Image (spheres, rainbow, N blue to C red):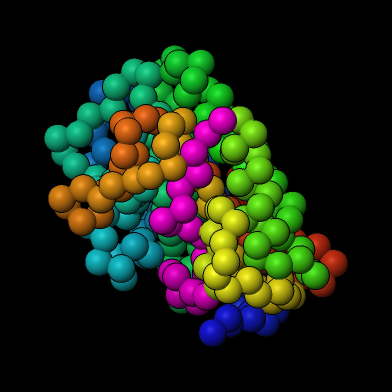
Amino acid sequence: MIRLKNEKQINGIRKSCQLLADMYKHVIPLVQAGMTTHDIDELCKEFIIHHGGKPAWYAEDFPGAACISINDEVIHGIPSKKRKIENGDIVSLDVGIDLDGYISDSAHTVKVGKVSPAAEKLIAVTKQCLEAGIAACKVGNRIGDISHAVYEVATKAGFGVVYEYCGHGVGLSVHEDPSVPNVPSRGANPRIQPGMVLAIEPMINIGTDEVLLEDDDWTVITADGSLSAHEEHTVAVFSDHTEILTKMD
């Protein structure tokens, strides 16, 4: 069931999203070679708790405040004291905050030092996919219009689009209806309505669109070992516009 949010609820979600955007503005400049993924997770957790929030992933039994995925890891990388960031890595951070019961969710892929031209292009295209998906998220369109917009940008660049994982409703719970696929689907295709709050999140691979689940039952990697990038915003739909709630600027 799709839960349409009222003005009070959207205001609460907006505050949570603004806190998440502030966290990224604080954390992203600190990510550098030599850090462990545990170090990054601690930065996220400390910022969230200091500002009165709770890491939203704890409610999902994820062992960290942040999903931290490096290079060929698509999503859900578990923070570790043993996993070090190296120069040239691309690091995807996916974080959610529970602020007074309102949930925010966004992801960004960070370049560490000088990355390859292929990685530069991948990250740029993934951001373009997110922008295209958000532009298609407006009253009167359908969820499938978001999917088509993301897919068209990625495939035009020659990249694979992850289809096994997708965006979703968010705001009062971490994962809500509807699902927001990044590829055209024959599944449910509801009309976009005012009051919807959605997490739109393209996961784009340089190579194959196929992914594998690691033995830890969390970390998802590309099936061919190619690089993957992840960008995500929480957006709220109004009758005359769509607002990016997690926008950093």
Number of marks: 0
Q: In the image, is 202 to the left or to the right of 27?
A: right
Q: Residue at x 32, y 33 (%)?
A: 224
Q: Against 222, is 57 above or below?
A: below
**Quarter containing the N terminus:** bottom right
**Quarter containing the C terminus:** top right
Question: 225 or 45: which is nearer to us?
Answer: 225
Question: 128 or 60: which is nearer to us?
Answer: 128
Q: Against 92, is 183 above or below?
A: below
Residue 97 screen position, x and y as percent:
44, 62
Residue 122 screen position, x and y as percent:
52, 29
Displayed quadrant of residue 49: bottom left
Q: Residue at x 63, y 71 (%)?
A: 189
Q: Residue at x 25, y 66 (%)?
A: 61
Q: In the image, is 74 to the left or to the right of 2?
A: left
Residue 140 screen position, x and y as percent:
80, 70
Q: In the image, is 35 to the left or to the right of 161?
A: left
The part of the chain drawn in magenta is 158-177
Q: Residue furthest right?
A: 240
Residue 73 screen position, x and y as percent:
33, 39
Q: Residue at x 39, y 30 (%)?
A: 227
Secondary structure character of the magenta stretch overall: loop
